[in-house]
């Protein structure tokens, strides 16, 4: 028996390690380093109906134990994605979680429908701005977010997970999404931060603010996963500053059934595969399995 | 050419003066792979993100000109010989080979990739002229490394405290001749000026752009720059671009 | 002229460096290291009407570039504070910002009235739970927070600043507090996080969650100060991971008129005075002053 | 006694076996100030918070027994001789002096403060017995340091692989006699057991508590422990407490 195997919403994954959306693009850059099928799954770069050019440079900057990014959702749009990437990824034997977003609920639904034949799971990025909700992210508005879920659920038969933001009323949004029929959750997305350049006196990022990720936010991820786990019985993909076996197990104890590696991949492109191998070594001489750890901090 | 991988380097020599430094690494697995103008993405201990650096190659070694700007580069300048580091390499596109004579204009740490190019071309029998500019004599200790390239080298400083007084781009109209190819790496203003001179003489010109990078390999999309041909990513489409494609005024200072 | 001098709500401070509440207690522990009057001000440990024993141990744990604390608002109550600490601090020539909290608005008002004779400013800690609002912190409920401000404004003639949380609707709360008559703001308080012990499988902190502070949260502080500065003309005390001159100037550019040093004092008890001296050196050979930097990132 | 300050220490020797280590610092400004049972709050490079440590004093040096638990202690065990560190010292209350004979029971790194006490008392003419317990022989290399104290020292291991088989607390009833004072520093279970033996013999007993600490000096209130006399703060009210005041079962493991 494989102690790392995970069943997640009816899909079997050989291990719980996935890449975090936006930190692995569509996988192509790393395919020569290790077989992408060795990872639990690849979560691809957030994809929208049409190509988006993204934010002005600079787009990233380092912070204490973290980084800020304002990529501005750059992506080449679902058509190019379907043509260039998805069939290739499938042919490699990789399992794919497709991260989708749009301006309106029907945009999410449009992308979800298109990619469904290739996607193990559909992940909704609710941190993108809701253009009809005054530009505030969907993640700040339980009702608007629920509309997205309803639209997507009507457009695909793949399981749909919603990616939650640590900003806004996270648990309230989760509750509304459950009512709207969401199948699972992933969290956390980044928190908006800023760095100011002392020489120019101006924000460093072209977009001024950017999303904070990396080890700095891990304690927030653990807390939010822990709280969400107490409030739902839908499965959770956890993320936020994960690199080591210890980090992954900490998120599992909090309640994450799978874990994503994001920023760590920039520091070390082998980070996701090293985590798989590390977990294999960890469980090799143990009686218990990964799933025994999931939610363990709540037991008793 | 082998695709990029994560390589081991050992710092073996370091010369630091003020906020500038020359660092030599033993990097036998990178050196043979790195084409002039390509770069490495260097893991500096204690920091989360890697830092892009364009070194010169000296047989099995890499030579890096470094300017301490922020935390990463400043820390790099304090590392002791023996320190083991990691670097993704080789990254980026590198310079195209010129037909005839190559005229190189460098400013600051732009000397790194151009030293690499100069050595590479001289070895292949090209005539190479290298004009290096600096504000003052703070980079005078770069001189022996640049002279050893075999190129014909001239130094310029704004205050005249080292080499000729003035900017290398002021000398450029008198240096460039038909058939030359221009390569400029340094501050944007310098590259723009140099490219302007080449354009008026209808000569091909290449520059190397900088961008804040996370991955260095094309996955994070952090290094986007607008160009005449649309948005490009410095780490994979560059860092070397034909000068006429670059929109200099849009770049951050 | 002293380039560090700051006028803040009518009070003159010799420099903009204050200690963050809860990281300097009432100052007594550090009085033998340097004259407390050399600091811009001492913000004292959050004080409530009656003594509070606080949370079960462990109360702190380190995180990447940060720490979690769950002290549980331990303090000896305003009576003991008035007797043992305030007159002593005043006699030393220190300027005191008194951080107050309570369960109900009238508790805040009670403490504020008592300490007013000794306080340069009154700082309201709105991150404490509102027992009549379901235990959610005041900082999550603009209306309840506004009630606190109204109660305190009626009980003291000292300037009143509200300490904002990065959780909850920060700017909405700030707006409601302005309408209620608050004089200024301080931010950011900590963000709730968690660490789980892999050996026990349980949250490390006795209280399970704790507040994240330190350099890890500085980008969030900069962003929130920047946003608040655009939305208010009341002065701001900024805090969150400040240690160096660069950190302080970054918060000033964002909009902080004064800055507080918190967690850094645990790493180095001299941190606040070193920041004062560092700023003195920085401005010694410059034409401009601290106040010229305040809000500089918004100029032009 | 000089109040605490931030002192400079230089690591001069290190012996590490597995996750245990003995580290010797040159600390001429701390050594004369540190009363047995007091502690220092040590800044480990790269970490934000300091780590409390209770060393022994050897003339102008500090000797630390360390167990690598988390990031801080593990990193400490990797530092090279020559590394300069900082420590707040002297902190905490320290042990009271006994009237007659002192019986010391230590487990793990509790050997540090008790070695300090043993040397201190032996020098002042007290008779001192030290019983050190460990799981296995992983701490056998502590032995020479403890023997050199001049106390009469016995070693116990659970598996009998070093010294006598069993727990030091098993031997305690046969060691303790009227007039003795007990000092126990180690795992809570060991201290509780030792204190229990002393209590049945109506002997005074002191233990040293641990707590997660941020400041170490009384300002952050992170080190609160419940005691029979109400809540106390380990860093200023302790770390040494009369055993009868301690609520062992309430302490975290
Ligand atoms: C292809 C390439 C090759 C390079 N080669 C060299 C080299 O050989 N030697 C050398 O010293 N430097 C080189 N650089 C620049 C170097 O990467 C940056 O100076 C470095 O990343 C800054 O890191 P830091 O931690 O010191 O500064 P940070 O704290 O990250 O920033 C400090 C300052 O530097 C600016 N900055 C940060 N990153 C970059 C960047 N990537 N490009 C431009 N400005 C930046 C910021 O705006 C800020 O003002 C190269 C950059 C690129 C893209
Ligand atoms: C007065 C005093 C004297 C001490 N003397 C020594 C000594 O001489 N040698 C020595 O090796 N250790 C000593 N300790 C314990 C030492 O401070 C902790 O082991 C250390 O702080 C753990 O830091 P870390 O980064 O390795 O672990 P962390 O990553 O912070 O934690 C790792 C594990 O250690 C536990 N832990 C963390 N801090 C403490 C703490 N302060 N007390 C108890 N458990 C803790 C955590 O619960 C966790 O399970 C002393 C503690 C105190 C309070
Ligand atoms: C450069 C970058 C780009 C990202 N792009 C996306 C995205 O397109 N869609 C999305 O849902 N999350 C995106 N994220 C968020 C990550 O998927 C992840 O939730 C977050 O970074 C926290 O994980 P980490 O700390 O391991 O990076 C991005 C993060 C980074 C750093
Ligand atoms: C141990 C500790 C105790 C704190 N106690 C209080 C408090 O009593 N009242 C309050 O308003 N803030 C309290 N804070 C928050 C700080 O004042 C400050 O807002 C926060 O720590 C961010 O600043 P820093 O990153 O510099 O520490 C406390 C913080 C810490 C770390
Ligand atoms: S640096 Fe990541 S895509 Fe260029
Ligand atoms: S450790 Fe801060 S009060 Fe004891």
Image (cartoon, coloured by chain):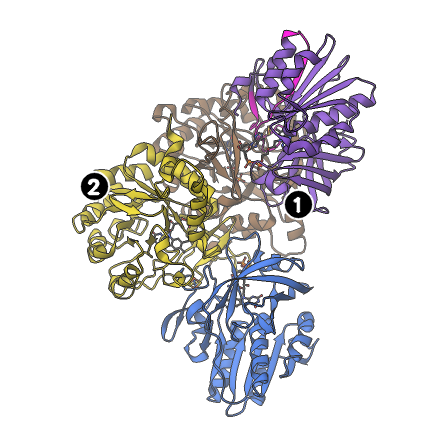
Chain colours: A brown, B purple, C yellow, D blue
- Which residue occupies the foreground of this view, D196 or B105? B105
- Which residue position is annotated with label 1? B79
Residue C94 visible to the viewer = yes
Q: Which residues are magenta?
A: B200-225
Tell me the quadrant of ligand 1.
top right
Disc 2 secondary structure class:
loop
Q: Position of residue A90 (x, y in %)?
A: 64, 28
Residue at 60%, 55% in the rendered image: A288
Mark 1 surroundings: few (<14), some (14-19) or many (≥20) residues within 10 A = some
Q: Position of residue C123 (x, y in %)?
A: 28, 49
Chain holding disc 2: C
State whether the magenta stretch is mostly helix, strand or loop. Answer: loop
Q: Which mark is residue C181?
A: 2
Instruction: Work out which quarter of the rendered image holds the N terminus of chain B and state it.
Output: top right
The CA distance from mark 1 to mark 2 is: 54 Å
**Direction from residue D63 to residue C251 in the image, left or right:** left
Ligand 1 within 8 Å of disc 1? The answer is no
Residue A233 visible to the viewer = no
Q: Nearer the viewer, mark 1 or mark 2?
A: 1
């Amino acid at each position: 028996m494989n102690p790392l195997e995970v069943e997640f919403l009816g899909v079997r994954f050989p291990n719980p390690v996935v890449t975090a959306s936006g930190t692995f693009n569509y996988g192509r850059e790393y395919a020569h380093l290790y077989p992408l099928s060795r990872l639990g799954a690849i979560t691809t770069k957030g994809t929208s109906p049409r190509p988006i050019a993204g934010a002005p440079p600079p787009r990233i900057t380092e912070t204490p134990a973290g980084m800020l990014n304002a990529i501005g959702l750059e992506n080449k749009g679902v058509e190019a994605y379907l043509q260039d990437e998805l069939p290739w990824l499938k042919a490699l034997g990789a399992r794919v979680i497709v991260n989708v977003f749009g301006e309106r609920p029907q945009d999410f639904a449009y992308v979800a429908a298109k990619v469904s034949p290739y996607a193990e799971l559909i992940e909704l990025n609710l941190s993108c701005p809701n253009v009809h909700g005054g530009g505030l992210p969907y993640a700040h508005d339980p009702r608007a977010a629920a509309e997205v879920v309803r639209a997507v659920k009507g457009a695909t038969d793949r399981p749909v997970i919603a990616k939650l933001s640590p900003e806004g009323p996270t648990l309230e949004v989760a509750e509304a999404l459950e009512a709207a029929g969401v199948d699972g959750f992933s969290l956390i997305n980044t928190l908006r931060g800023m760095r100011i350049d002392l020489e120019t006196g101006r924000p460093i990022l072209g977009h001024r603010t950017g999303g904070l990720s990396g080890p700095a936010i891990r304690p927030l991820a653990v807390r939010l996963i822990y709280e969400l786990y107490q409030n739902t019985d839908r499965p959770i993909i956890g993320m936020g500053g994960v690199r080591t076996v210890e980090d992954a197990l900490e998120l599992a104890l909090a309640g994450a059934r799978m874990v994503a590696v994001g920023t760590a991949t920039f520091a070390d492109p082998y980070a996701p595969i090293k985590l798989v191998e590390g977990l294999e070594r960890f469980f090799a001489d143990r009686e218990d399995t990964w799933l025994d750890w999931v939610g363990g901090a709540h037991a008793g | 050419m082998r695709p990029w991988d994560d390589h081991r380097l050992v710092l073996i020599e370091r010369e630091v003066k003020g906020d500038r430094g020359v660092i030599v690494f033993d990097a036998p697995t990178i050196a043979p792979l790195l084409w002039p103008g390509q770069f490495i993405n260097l893991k500096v201990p204690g920091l989360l993100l890697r830092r892009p650096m364009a070194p010169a190659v000296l047989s099995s070694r890499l030579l890096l000109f470094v300017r301490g700007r922020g935390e990463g580069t400043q820390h790099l300048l304090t590392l002791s010989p023996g320190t083991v580091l990691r670097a993704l390499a080789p990254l980026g596109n590198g310079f195209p080979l010129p037909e005839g004579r190559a005229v190189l204009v460098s400013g600051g740490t732009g000397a790194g990739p151009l030293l690499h190019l100069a050595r590479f071309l001289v070895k292949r029998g090209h005539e190479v002229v290298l004009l290096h500019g600096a504000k003052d004599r703070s980079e005078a200790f770069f001189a022996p490394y640049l002279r050893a390239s075999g190129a014909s080298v001239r130094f310029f400083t704004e205050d005249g405290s080292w080499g000729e007084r003035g900017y290398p781009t002021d000398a450029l109209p008198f240096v460039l001749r038909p058939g030359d190819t221009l390569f400029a790496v340094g501050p944007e203003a310098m590259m723009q000026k140099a490219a302007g001179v080449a354009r008026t003489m209808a000569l091909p010109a290449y520059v190397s752009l900088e961008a804040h990078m996370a991955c260095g390999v094309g996955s994070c999309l952090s290094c986007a720059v607008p160009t005449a041909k649309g948005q490009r990513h410095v780490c994979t489409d560059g860092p070397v671009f034909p000068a006429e494609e670059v929109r200099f005024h849009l770049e951050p200072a």
